[in-house]
Image: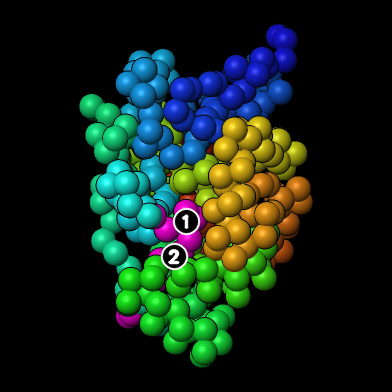
């Protein structure tokens, strides 16, 4: 069978960026895919999907469940955008007073085009960078920066507050460091995702965050490794986000700079997949033991494998 065409690897939509079938993007040809094609998809946020885009998701790709990994801040940004108000930048942690940080805003339900849900679609919202993660980020700030962040946050200067985390913590950690932090502190959220994935009635599934690059990439990495996809194939899928997001790169660079981050946060880190695979092996004993530590027992892992393995 011939190699995949660009349209097979990254199908084009009018208003959904970075979309792909993970089985095809990790397999050199459809016949050599280790995952069943047509089951696991990834993308950037589909909020602005046109009616035609929505029909393709349901009629062409038969997607039943959308797992949204975004934070409360990102959902607040979406509401602000719909109201044509200034909105905070995307891909940021949320905070809670009970976990040593400023309070978070309640998140609206994830939705499709113009805030409208796609009929018949099951939406699952998982605040991937949840309490444990945000507490870890907050704890790395000096007392001065903690006080400044809280003061800005409670007086309504949310973007400025978040930029303190961006400049003083996230930029220091880099994409690889933050991915390792996610492994360490997003275990409850990873268990939530796998709870959905272990249910046969959930499939086919689309997983997304804002850009469909980092949090989505980590979830896809864990699923792919669990089913037996090799590191180089996982890396190829991860790096496809470079072309999948190329159309709005300038906007993304502007957003990360406003957060106090370097331009690397708008792209993909070349060695990230290798580092995360090494972290899983050396620190956690491999992906299966890591998932067990998250509360995803072997029986549930087995169900995911049965559903996805080609």
Q: Is residue 223 magenta?
A: no
Establish if 200 lies above or below 36. below
Q: Nearer the viewer, residue 84 or 96?
A: 84
Establish if 170 lies above or below 267. below
Q: Is residue 94 magenta?
A: yes
> Residue at left 63%, top 28%?
25
Label 2 residue SS:
helix
57 relative to 24 in the view: left or right: left
Name the quarter where the N terminus is drawn: top right
Establish if 285 lies above or below 137. above
277 relative to 288 in the view: left or right: right
- Cβ–Cβ below 8 Å for labels 1 and 2? yes
- Residue 141 rendering spot, x and y as whole percentages: 55, 82
Q: Which residues are magenta?
A: 87-99
- Residue 121 rendering spot, x and y as whole percentages: 28, 31
Q: Which mark is residue 159?
A: 2
Residue 172's quadrant in the figure?
bottom right
Chain-order first, disc 1 or disc 2 = 1
Q: Nearer the viewer, residue 51 or 249?
A: 249
Residue 33's quadrant in the figure?
top right
Disc 1: which residue: 89
Q: Nearer the viewer, residue 23 or 293?
A: 23
Q: Main secondary structure of the magenta part?
A: loop
């Amino acid at each position: 069978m011939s190699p995949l065409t660009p349209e097979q690897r990254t199908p084009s939509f009018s208003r959904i960026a970075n979309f792909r079938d993970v089985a095809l993007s990790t397999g050199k040809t459809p016949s050599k895919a280790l995952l069943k094609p047509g089951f696991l998809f990834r993308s950037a946020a589909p909020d602005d999907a046109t009616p035609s885009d929505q029909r393709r998701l349901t009629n062409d790709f038969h997607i039943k469940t959308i797992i949204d990994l975004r934070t409360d801040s990102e959902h607040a940004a979406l509401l602000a955008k719909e109201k044509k108000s200034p909105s905070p930048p995307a891909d940021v942690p949320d905070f809670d007073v009970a976990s040593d940080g400023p309070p978070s805003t309640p998140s609206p339900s994830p939705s499709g085009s113009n805030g409208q849900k796609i009929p018949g679609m099951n939406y699952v919202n998982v605040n991937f960078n949840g309490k444990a993660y945000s507490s870890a980020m907050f704890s790395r700030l000096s007392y001065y920066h903690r006080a400044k962040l809280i003061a800005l946050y409670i007086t309504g200067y949310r973007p400025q507050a978040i930029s303190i985390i961006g400049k003083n913590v996230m930029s220091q950690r880099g994409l690889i460091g933050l991915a390792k932090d996610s492994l360490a502190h997003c275990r409850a959220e990873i268990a939530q995702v796998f709870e959905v994935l272990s249910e046969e009635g959930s499939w086919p599934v689309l997983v997304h965050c804002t850009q469909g690059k980092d949090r989505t990439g980590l979830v896809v990495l864990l699923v792919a490794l669990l089913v037996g996809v090799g590191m180089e194939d996982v890396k190829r899928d991860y790096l496809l986000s470079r072309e999948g997001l190329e159309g709005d790169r300038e906007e993304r660079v502007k957003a990360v700079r406003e957060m106090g981050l370097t331009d690397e946060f708008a792209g993909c880190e070349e060695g990230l997949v290798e580092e995360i695979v090494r972290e899983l092996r050396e620190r956690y004993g491999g992906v299966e033991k890591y998932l067990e530590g998250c509360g995803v027992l072997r029986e549930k892992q087995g169900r995911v494998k049965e559903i996805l393995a080609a």
